[in-house]
Image (cartoon, rainbow, N blue to C red):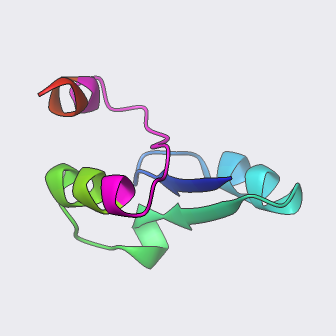
């Protein structure tokens, strides 16, 4: 599965998902400084599910 993990996602979660074969882009290292909007747009373009702990990220996805 292709997943972008937002900057606030724990490294242990990112590593665990990668260890079981998921393609995880972690915003903290793979997309530093990208806005939530940009991460969401990239996820949509690449057909990825977003992992985040941001409470406001759901509002962006809804819009």
**What residue is shown at x 32% (from left), y 32% (from top)?**
54
Between 43 and 17, the one nearer to me in the picture: 43
Between 61 and 47, the one nearer to me in the picture: 47
Does 58 sit above or below residue 37? Answer: above
Q: Quadrant of residue 7?
A: bottom left
Does 58 sit above or below residue 33? Answer: above
On the picture, is 57 further left or further right than 51? left
- Measuring from the top left, give residue 6's x and y in whole percent: 41, 50
**What residue is shown at x 51% (from left), y 45% (from top)?**
9
The C terminus lies in quadrant: top left
Q: How many numbered badges does the structure rendering display?
A: 0
On the picture, is 10 further left or further right than 45? right
On the picture, is 56 further left or further right than 54? left
Question: Is the stretch drawn in magenta largely helix, strand or loop?
Answer: loop
Q: Quadrant of residue 47?
A: bottom left
- Residue 56 falls inside the magenta stretch: yes
**What residue is shown at x 76% (from left), y 51% (from top)?**
17
**What residue is shown at x 42% (from left), y 46% (from top)?**
8
- Measuring from the top left, give residue 14's x and y in whole percent: 66, 54
On the picture, is 55 further left or further right than 60? right
- Measuring from the top left, give residue 5's x and y in whole percent: 49, 52
- Measuring from the top left, give residue 52's x and y in whole percent: 43, 38
Residue at the extreme right: 20
Q: Write down the region rendered in magenta.
A: 43-58
């Amino acid at each position: 599965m292709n997943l972008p993990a937002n900057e606030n996602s724990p490294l242990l979660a990112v590593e665990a998902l990668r260890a079981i074969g998921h393609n995880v882009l972690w915003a903290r290292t793979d997309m530093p400084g990208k806005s939530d909007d940009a991460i969401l747009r990239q996820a949509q373009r690449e057909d990825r599910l977003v992992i985040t702990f941001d409470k406001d990220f759901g509002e962006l996805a809804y819009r």
